[in-house]
Amino acid sequence: MRLGIICEGLADAEVLPILVRKLDPTISIVKPIEMGRQGGAKIRLTRDAGKNAASLLRIDHCDRVAIVWDLCPRWAETDPPFLWRDVRAIRVVLICIIRELESWLIADHTALIKLIKNTSHYGEGDVPRFKRPEEHHDPKGVLKEFFRSARRDGDYMPTTHAKQIAIHIECNNLRRCPTFRRFARKVAGYIISS
């Protein structure tokens, strides 16, 4: 299967393909289309996702396109405002990550342990664990605080560290994230039980 991904930012564009390959290494992924690193990514996503999805389906010959965003904009998944009428919705998958990408990243504390293993004084017991990571009000703030405390290189930088965390993630450890389970099922047919 050939998959196209449309997402908000660079960190998403780097992490999502890593997770897809972990779910199913046979999936071919077209270079993700990220809608911007600065403000306005959600507006561009709303405005341009239909056009980009059509291009991925027709020109890049994708079998499926995943449009992934976080928090806002909030629209009903049955009637997204950005899909062109000529794009067959069955081949376009919509995934809204509750809160933000970092909700998925904090769900697997073992990935954080592996990341800091040789660069920190932190022990395994110091790494935060969350039963319901998508319910945490500020997952990016959790990572910022964790990096400030545990790493010598300072603050959490999404464009650098999100990919490093994703490399260590075990997808079954993300089962506490309903939106990740949906992502796995929709893009790879991978069923993760909660």
Image (cartoon, rainbow, N blue to C red):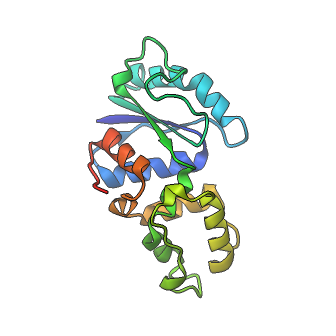
| Residue drawn at 70 percent across, 68 percent down | 155
Whether residue 31 sits left or right of residue 157 in the image: it is left
| Residue 14 image point, x, y percent | 52, 50
Q: Which image quadrant: the C terminus?
A: bottom left
Depth order, front residue of 100/91: 100
| Residue 118 image point, x, y percent | 53, 83
- How many numbered marks have been drawn onto this rendered protein structure? 0
Q: Which image quadrant: the N terminus?
A: top left
Whether residue 121 sits left or right of residue 95 in the image: it is right
| Residue 193 image point, x, y percent | 28, 55
Q: Is residue 127 visible?
A: yes
| Residue drawn at 35 percent across, 51 percent down | 21
| Residue drawn at 44 percent across, 62 percent down | 167
Using the image, determine if residue 90 lies above or below residue 148: above
| Residue 127 image point, x, y percent | 53, 77
Using the image, determine if residue 188 lies above or below residue 148: above
Whether residue 163 sits left or right of residue 38 in the image: it is left
Q: Is residue 152 visible?
A: no
Depth order, front residue of 117/128: 128
As drawn, the residue found furthest toward the right would be 39
Q: Splitting the image into 4 quarters, where does residue 59 fall?
A: top left
